[in-house]
């Protein structure tokens, strides 16, 4: 009498498909966490996580519905836009044109080139696009195609790029380790589903508890590997990535590195690793004053986790005021010159600048360059700044002016304050409403901010007005007994803001450290402050025409300084960076001397572009700055990364296909290739029957396929199996078969073969 077929009790059943889906979703969350920990996205990071989850969930639903592959491909762009646009639309900075066509064009540019953009919003959109593609691929390949290794390969590329470019790898170590562990769960889960499918096709039942034991084995292996990754100390402290990729992010991997990034202009102020001066001329200029001037490009107004960034909208919590852009043509900028304006018209001199600007002088975005507070331009573009809602179109401040095209010959007009020290002391603190957006530290009660505020109170004890308080902070930072200027500052400990480490322990840094510290301390005292990213005065040109004054500015003149707001006088500059061997920036002059008095701070009488100035702006190293989401990856680096990734994938695919470890592995590859081309092995079909269909579709492989099938039949069903020599023969046959299966051969013959 036949015994009943054993059935698996429901209590032993583990919903592996559901577990696999959850593992894929968690994997995308952790990958997003790793990217956010590296600092690619400064604001709006939650949106990137949402997009990654949405992509994986969309692919999982399509996989469950068993839709055709072509449908999945056709739906992909629509599903991507449905996830990305609603998530990022609210953060899109206004540029003067809110039409649907213009918005669509901006999204098209951000989706295709966001990672190479100087805009934080565009970079975020580009990053969301990458995460969506990765999540969609992961969900489909794991849950429908059952190809775990192929499903996670793009994720490994992202994780490798992330850790190689992170400023502090310690910050990404935990999420990267968890991501790898979850990827192993996904690979194991897909393999189990594939095994189950083959058993079902061959009418093979698994023994009770098999699935549970398999899951337990995978869980133990994942736990052991994760613990090893987290607990085992590093084999070396050498910055290997800086040696393998010298242009990527040397000197900023948490240990100081063995190299130094080249000094260049950058829009954000993010204190980082070592810098090196390799001056390249970026512009020349002349002004109608008796001395050179500082050249401002972008104002950094948003203080986030110890770093400063330009505003991009949605971050100005002031009633009746918003941040946005106003389209401008050639002529006077649309400034609101009421008493609430920050232009400082009470005591200011007009300065006209004529500039010859080299491509890339202001980064990947073409900005106007001003010799003070902007008032007029000669090129069309978009002026970004604070706007009073009741007077739309008129700017209370101008944080930057983006050119509509790329201009090389510029003429700009600006204001330089001529207020005296006594006037600024008497200015009081009756700040207009919009200026309160520039005191953003007051609502922050974190320990780093408390430390900054305590030092600010200590340094300014005894002062009775904002000007003397600002001067006290400036003087303390410039004191050589307290702080030293260096291009190779020590790395801050993990989890500690570099600016706090600079203020409390190291006391060494370059201009970003000094400017960040002073700006944060002013805000902690309730004094409105912002940072200015631009260039120092440069050096006198030896080739200027007789009777004219022209200065040369190089990459090494990139600089950051501080401006504080004083009622009635507007934004007043301060120079907290001390003198050094590279040059001598000195405090700004007050009164009429600021325009036609003693030499301007930082001016050098040494001709030529070879001199190196202190207080350099944080660089844009070739390989992307992880600390500033908006700097993006340079175009050459993106292209090289894509080519290298494709080459690695091609090599892995070739090795996987040509070098199986066993006859069964080779046969699985044959079935996989056949299935990908529409010739799946049918239920109950023998090896030889399946080989005949393959041989009919691909005559070139007929002989080795038939011999391969005979040997596999003996291996699977003969009591003697096959010896070592025949096992080796199967692998030789497979290496003859694989090249004989061109990608389209089976497609052309599929109808006739079936």
Image: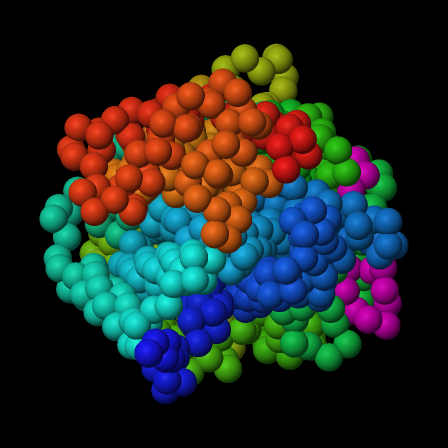
Q: Position of residue 77 (x, y in %)?
A: 71, 50
**Residue pictured at 65% horizontal, 71% vertical:** 316
Q: Is residue 52 above or below residue 109?
A: below
Q: Is residue 314 above or below residue 430?
A: above
Q: The N terminus appears in which quarter of the rendering?
A: bottom left
Q: Is residue 346 visible?
A: no
Tell me, yes or no, whether the highlighted magenta stretch contains residue 382: yes
Name the one closer to the observer, 288 or 503. 503
**Residue pictured at 56% horizontal, 27% vertical:** 696
Q: Position of residue 89 (x, y in %)?
A: 72, 62
Residue 568 in which image quadrant: bottom right
Tell me, yes or no, whether the highlighted magenta stretch contains residue 584: no
Question: From the viewer's perspective, is 475 left or right of 468?
Answer: left
Question: From the viewer's perspective, is 60 left or right of 458?
Answer: right
Q: Position of residue 357 (x, y in %)?
A: 62, 27
Question: From the viewer's perspective, is 63 left or right of 204?
Answer: right
Name the one closer to the observer, 684 or 206. 684
Q: Residue furthest bottom?
A: 11
Q: Is residue 114 above or below residue 342?
A: above
Q: Which residues are magenta?
A: 379-396
**Residue pictured at 51% horizontal, 60% vertical:** 143
Q: Position of residue 210 (x, y in %)?
A: 29, 71
Residue 670 in which image quadrant: top left
Q: Is residue 213 visible?
A: yes
Name the one closer to the observer, 192 or 736. 736
């Amino acid at each position: 009498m036949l015994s009943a077929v054993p059935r698996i009790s429901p209590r032993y059943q583990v919903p592996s498909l559901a577990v696999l889906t959850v593992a894929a979703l968690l994997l995308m969350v952790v990958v997003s966490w790793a990217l956010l920990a590296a600092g690619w996205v400064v604001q709006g990071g939650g949106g990137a996580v949402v997009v990654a989850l949405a992509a994986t969930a969309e692919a999982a639903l399509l996989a469950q519905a068993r839709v055709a592959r072509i449908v999945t491909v056709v739906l992909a762009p629509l599903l991507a836009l449905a996830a990305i646009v609603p998530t990022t639309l609210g953060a899109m900075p206004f540029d003067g044109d809110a039409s649907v066509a213009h918005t669509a064009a901006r999204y098209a540019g951000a989706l295709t080139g966001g990672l190479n953009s100087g805009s934080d919003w565009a970079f975020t959109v580009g990053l969301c696009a990458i995460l969506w593609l990765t999540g969609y691929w992961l969900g489909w390949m794991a849950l429908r195609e059952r190809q775990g290794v192929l499903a996670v390969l793009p994720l490994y590329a992202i994780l490798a790029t992330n850790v190689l470019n992170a400023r502090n790898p310690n910050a990404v170590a935990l999420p990267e380790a968890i991501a790898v562990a979850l990827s192993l769960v996904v690979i194991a889960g897909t393999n189990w589903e594939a095994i189950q499918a083959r058993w079902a096709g061959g009418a093979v039942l698994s023994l009770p508890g098999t699935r549970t034991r398999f899951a337990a084995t995978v869980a133990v292996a994942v736990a052991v590997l994760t613990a090893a990754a987290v607990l085992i100390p590093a084999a070396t402290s050498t910055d290997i990535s800086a040696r393998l990729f010298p242009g990527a992010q040397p000197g900023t991997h948490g240990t100081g590195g063995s190299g130094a990034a080249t000094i260049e202009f950058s829009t954000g102020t993010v204190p980082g690793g070592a810098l090196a001066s390799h001056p390249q001329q970026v512009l020349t200029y002349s002004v109608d004053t008796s001395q050179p001037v500082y050249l401002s490009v972008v104002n950094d107004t948003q203080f986030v986790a110890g770093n400063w960034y330009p505003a991009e909208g949605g971050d100005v919590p002031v009633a009746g005021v918003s941040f946005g852009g106003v389209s401008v043509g050639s002529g006077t900028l649309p400034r609101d010159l009421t008493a609430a304006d920050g232009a400082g018209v009470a005591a200011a001199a007009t300065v006209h600048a004529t500039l010859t600007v080299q491509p890339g002088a202001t980064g990947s975005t073409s900005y106007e360059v001003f010799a003070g507070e902007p008032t007029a331009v000669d090129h069309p573009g978009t002026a970004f700044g604070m706007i009073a809602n009741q007077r739309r179109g008129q700017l209370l401040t101008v944080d930057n002016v983006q050119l509509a095209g790329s201009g090389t010959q510029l003429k700009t007009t600006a204001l330089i304050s001529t207020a005296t020290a006594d006037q600024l002391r008497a200015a009081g603190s009756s700040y207009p409403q919009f200026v309160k957006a520039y005191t953003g530290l007051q609502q922050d009660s974190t320990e780093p901010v408390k430390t900054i505020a305590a030092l600010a109170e200590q340094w300014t004890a005894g002062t009775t007005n904002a000007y003397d308080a600002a001067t006290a902070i400036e003087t303390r930072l410039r004191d050589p007994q307290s702080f030293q200027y260096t291009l190779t500052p020590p790395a801050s400990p993990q989890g500690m803001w570099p600016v706090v480490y600079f203020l409390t322990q190291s006391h060494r840094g370059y201009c970003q450290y000094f400017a960040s510290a002073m700006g944060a301390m002013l805000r902690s005292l309730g004094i409105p402050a912002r940072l200015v990213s631009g260039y120092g005065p440069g050096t006198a040109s030896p080739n200027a025409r007789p009777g004219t004054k022209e200065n040369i500015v190089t990459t090494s003149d990139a600089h950051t300084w501080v401006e504080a707001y004083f009622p009635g006088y507007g934004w007043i500059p301060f120079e907290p960076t001390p003198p050094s061997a590279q040059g001598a920036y000195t405090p700004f002059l007050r009164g009429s001397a600021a325009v036609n008095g003693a030499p301007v701070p930082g001016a050098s009488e040494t001709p030529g572009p070879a001199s190196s100035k202190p207080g350099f702006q944080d660089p844009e190293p070739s390989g992307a700055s992880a600390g500033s989401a908006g700097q993006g990856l340079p175009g050459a680096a993106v292209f090289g990364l894509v080519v290298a990734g494709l080459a690695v994938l091609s090599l892995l695919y070739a090795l996987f296909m040509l070098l199986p470890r066993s006859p069964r592995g080779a046969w699985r590859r044959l079935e996989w290739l056949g299935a990908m081309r529409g010739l799946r092995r049918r239920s109950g079909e023998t090896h030889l029957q399946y080989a005949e269909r393959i041989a009919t579709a691909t005559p070139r492989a007929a002989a080795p396929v038939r011999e391969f099938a005979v040997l596999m039949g003996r291996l699977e069903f003969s009591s003697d199996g096959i010896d070592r020599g025949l096992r080796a023969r199967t692998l030789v046959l497979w290496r003859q078969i694989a090249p004989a299966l061109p990608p389209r051969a089976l497609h052309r013959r599929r109808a006739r073969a079936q």
